[in-house]
Image (cartoon, helix red, strand yellow):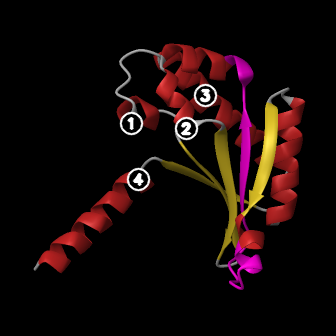
Amino acid sequence: MKRLLFALLFIASLSLSAQNLTTYRSNKSVDETVDRLIEVIKQKKLAYFETVEHDKVAEEYGVKIPPTRMILFEDPNLMIELISCRQTTALDLPMKILVWEENGDVYIGFFDPKVMKKRFLLHECDDIITSMSRLKVRVVNEVLKDG
């Protein structure tokens, strides 16, 4: 009975977190999508930090997983405003966008920054968080509009 309850709670927690995941389908390969994403981030004069290549790390450990890349970036002004509002929000920074291949399709996804309102019990900072949400959507839409 405990196992069943645990399994149900686990599945419920996954579905709750999935509700905050925004996903888009890309018509490009993972590499092309990542390259375009980095290009758009730099064009918008955002701070690009790095691309974490999870599939390459897994390969170093002898495990093959489909292409899975995490792009780390931020808008310095929004970062400063958000951390000034509540320092613990730095735990969710820099912003992240995931690009991955699943069943032959390529996806772009990210957690909506609005999740931070619950995670950090924010009752202020709404404008900053809304701006971060809009920024992620604009960046992804710019990547996708070219194909």
Which one is nearer the viewer's eye here, 119 or 30? Answer: 119
Residue that sits furthest to the front in the current view = 61
Answer whether residue 63 is magenta in the image.
Answer: yes
Circles 2 and 1, Cβ within 8 Å, touching? The answer is yes
Residue at x-position 72% and y-position 26%: 75
Of the image marks 4 and 1, the number of the one nearer the N terminus: 4
Circle 2: residue type: Asp
Q: Secondary structure at mark 2?
A: helix
Answer above or below: position of 84 versus 116.
above
The CA span between labels 2 and 1 is 10 Å
Q: Which residue is mark 2?
A: 92
For image coordinates 68% across by 84% down, the residue present is 63
| Location of mark 1 (residue) | 119
Q: Quarter-wise, where is residue 45 in the image? A: top right
Label 4 with label 1: CB-CB less than 8 Å = no
Disc 2 crowd, CA 10 A, few/some/many (<14, 14-19, 20+): few
Q: Which mark is residue 17?
A: 4
Q: Amino acid at mark 4?
A: Ser
Q: Amino acid at mark 3?
A: Met
